[in-house]
Structures are given as C-alpha cells and as structure tokens.
Image (spheres, rainbow, N blue to C red):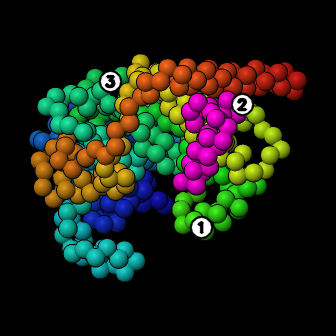
C-alpha cells in the first residue's frame, strides 16, 4: 500500500520538515490540481497554507485511481501552499542530524514550500533588470528562459492566457497570484552535448581543450572565430550557410507539441575535422535559438533584448529566495525577488541588416524542415498501410 505520492521537490520538503503540505507549483503544473480554485477566497499575504480544494475527484475516478481521493486526498495532498510558505517547524532535529543529508544546518531552520527546478530558476531571474522599475505589472512583459538539459520558457500574467502549444495557464504555480504559461524545448544543452560527444573529432577536441586549459565550448568558439577570418565570412553566423539543424531530437514540446518529431541535420560531408564539428555545433546553437523564436512568435513578441542574470546559478538563487521568504526576511515572494535578483550582461538584437536577413532565411529553412518531415511521415505511413 502506497503511503504518499509526491513530486521530488515536495518529497525533499517533507523529508526536511515532516510536513507533507504540497506546493502549488508541483500540484498545479504536474498533478492536474486547479490552483485557481483558491482565487476567490485567498491571497498570498492573508494565508499561504490552504486545505486542498482544487482536486477533480471525477478525473481520478474515471482513470481508475479513485483511491487517491480517499482521506481527503491524503496520498496526493490534503493541503497546499504558495511557494515560499514556511513549512512545519522548519528543519527537524532528525533531518538536521542525518549524516546522509550533511546540511550543516541547525534544527528549526525555516524551510519554504518548494518549486520545480525550472520554476525556481524563473524566480531567480525574472526581476533581474539593469534598472529598477516602479511598475509592478512590468513583470508581465518579460519571458524567462531557464536553460539546462532542456529549456523552459516562462511568462506570467494577471489574466489567464491560452496559447496553442504552450502549457498552462497555471495560477500561482511560480509567482503567487499570477498566471504562469510555460513553453519549452525538450533537448537543448543535451543536444549540444550529443552533437559534440558523438562526433569523431570529439576526443581530439577534448585533448586540445585540456592542453589549453579551457572549456570545450570556448575552444569551439575560438575555432569559429579563426574560421571566420580564414574564410573571410562577413559575420560568424554565415559559417553555417550550408548546414541546417532541426533540434527536435527528443520530440517537440512547444509550440508544435509533437512527441514524434525527429531531429534533422542537413549538409553533412565526410569532413572529420574539428572545424566541421565547430560548424555543426554553431548550426545546432542557431537551431535552438530558432526554436525559441518559434515559441516567442506564438506570444506575439520579437526583437527583445536578452538580459543575463548576474547569478548564473539561477535555480539555486530561486531556492534561496524561497528560504528567505520562509524565514520572514521579506513579506512576500515578489519583494524578495526584487531585492535579490540582479542583472548581468545585456545583449541587444543586432542592428546589422545583413545578419537579420541571414537569420530570417535560416529560420525559414528551419520551419520547412519540420514540414518536410510531416510530408515524409505521411508518405511512409501510406506505404505501410
């Protein structure tokens, strides 16, 4: 008999505090919980620990999991809380002393209601602005990209927005009292790793990087700079004029939502050199950027500057912000974000019309590669019918 079902972040909170209150982030985004059931009678400052009233019992019954409804939903969460709400009495003595935890913290240290990793990254980034803004609703005009193995595209709004191919809207799933919409790419960092590690020149590249005491990515960037000068390319992106990538190696999450989508590499040769690997790497980076453009175009936005946060580990900063709110250092999550987020480098769109024209052409090919895949899929389906 199963005692509890819970997401990883809720499990960690439970192990730390003994309190199995669930996060609105995990329950709403991953467990079909209707967070907006609390909209009419709750807000973050009045109360952040609520009896669960957003479960759809008929849904669980219909799919044969009616036992999850028993005991006022004890197995999946009988109470929920906004991210950052202080759980229980903080860190339990057992958790504080546990050798396998090795936290180095004292008992009763405040523990905040959790967020999923990418959503914690959103909290750690979304207020990272080069200049302070007084408009509280300006946060609704931003999109956060949390990049790792995959990439999540986060945006919040005061009103619920339904966007084809984009998850949500989820009420209070990241920032309390805001609706979250979430796009994503299934493989980004993982794709770059695959492109590099599967290439015949990868061992040679790794040896050169080690001997030069630099990273693989910095070495690849250096190779691309050298190639641009040697080939007299007008700009570095032009090195991939004959190499095109569709990055759906793990399906397409947004905005097409096609799990059957496959990756495509167009323009391969028999060249086994580090230079060819660098060219393929650049094409993959461009393809990931075009995938983000595809998502952003569904949100009717383009030409936006990119703000890199001062803290590169945004997920860890987001988790720390939850702890700060739980410790009552700030009155709410939004206040803590404004105090602890900070901007780093700001990258503005290129003003070179040649670069824009080039990427527009590459993006057109990017979109065509998927349409061609659909046509080929149909041809083969007919052949096997």
Q: Is 107 in the magenta?
A: no
Q: CA distance from mark 1 to mark 3?
A: 50 Å
Give the secondary structure at mark 2: loop
Query: Which residue is drawn at the image coordinates 61% and 21% (left, top)?
Result: 361
Give the secondary structure at mark 3: loop
Residues shaded magenta: 218-247
What is the crowding at mark 3: few (fewer than 14 residues within 10 Å), some, or many (at least 20)? some
Q: Is 241 in the magenta?
A: yes
Q: Which residue is mark 3?
A: 160
Give residue 242's mark: 2
Task: Indicate left or right for 188 with 379 as reference.
Answer: left
What is the crowding at mark 1: few (fewer than 14 residues within 10 Å), some, or many (at least 20)? few
Picture quarter with the C terminus: top right
Give residue 210's mark: 1
Task: Indicate left or right for 89 with 384 as reference.
Answer: left
Q: In which image quadrant can residue 219 be found?
A: bottom right
Pick whichever of labels 1 and 3 is earlier in the sequence: 3
Give the secondary structure at mark 1: helix
Percent from the top left, x then y, of residue 381? 81, 25
Percent from the top left, x then y, of residue 104? 28, 76
Query: Which residue is drawn at the image coordinates 31% and 46% (left, top)?
Result: 344
């Amino acid at each position: 008999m199963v005692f509890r079902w819970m997401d990883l972040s809720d499990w960690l909170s439970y192990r730390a505090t003994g309190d199995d209150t669930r996060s609105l982030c995990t329950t709403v985004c991953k467990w079909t919980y209707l967070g907006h059931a609390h909209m009419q009678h709750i807000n973050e400052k009045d109360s952040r620990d609520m009896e669960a009233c957003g479960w759809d019992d008929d849904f669980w019954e219909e799919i044969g999991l009616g036992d999850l409804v028993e005991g006022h939903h004890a197995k999946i969460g009988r109470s929920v809380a906004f991210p950052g709400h202080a759980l229980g009495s903080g860190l339990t003595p057992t958790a504080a002393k546990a050798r396998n935890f090795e936290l180095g913290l004292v008992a009763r240290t405040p523990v905040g209601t959790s967020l999923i990793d990418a959503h914690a990254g959103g909290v750690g980034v979304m207020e990272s602005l080069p200049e302070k803004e007084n408009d509280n609703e300006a946060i609704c005009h931003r999109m956060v990209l949390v990049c790792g193995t995959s990439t999540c595209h986060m945006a919040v709004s005061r009103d619920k927005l339904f966007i084809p191919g984009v998850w949500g809207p989820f009420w209070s799933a990241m920032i309390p009292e805001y609706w979250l919409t979430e796009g994503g790419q299934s493989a980004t960092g993982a794709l770059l790793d695959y492109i590099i590690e599967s290439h015949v020149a990868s061992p040679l590249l790794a040896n050169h990087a080690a001997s030069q005491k630099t990273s693989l990515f910095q070495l690849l960037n250096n190779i691309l700079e050298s190639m641009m000068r040697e080939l007299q390319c007008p700009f570095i992106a032009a090195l991939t004029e004959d190499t095109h990538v569709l990055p759906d190696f793990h399906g397409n999450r947004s905005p097409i939502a096609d799990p059957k989508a496959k990756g495509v590499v167009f323009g391969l040769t028999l060249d086994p050199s580090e230079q060819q690997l660098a060219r393929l790497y650049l094409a993959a980076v461009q393809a990931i950027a075009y995938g983000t453009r595809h998502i952003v175009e569904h949100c009717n936005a383009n030409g936006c500057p990119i703000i890199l946060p001062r803290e590169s580990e945004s997920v860890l900063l987001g988790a720390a912000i939850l702890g700060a709110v739980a410790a009552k250092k700030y009155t709410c999550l939004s206040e803590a974000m404004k105090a602890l987020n900070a901007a780093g480098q700001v990258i503005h769109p290129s003003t070179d019309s040649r670069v824009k024209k080039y990427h527009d052409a590459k993006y057109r090919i990017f979109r065509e590669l998927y349409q061609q895949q659909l046509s080929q899929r149909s041809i083969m389906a007919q052949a096997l019918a």
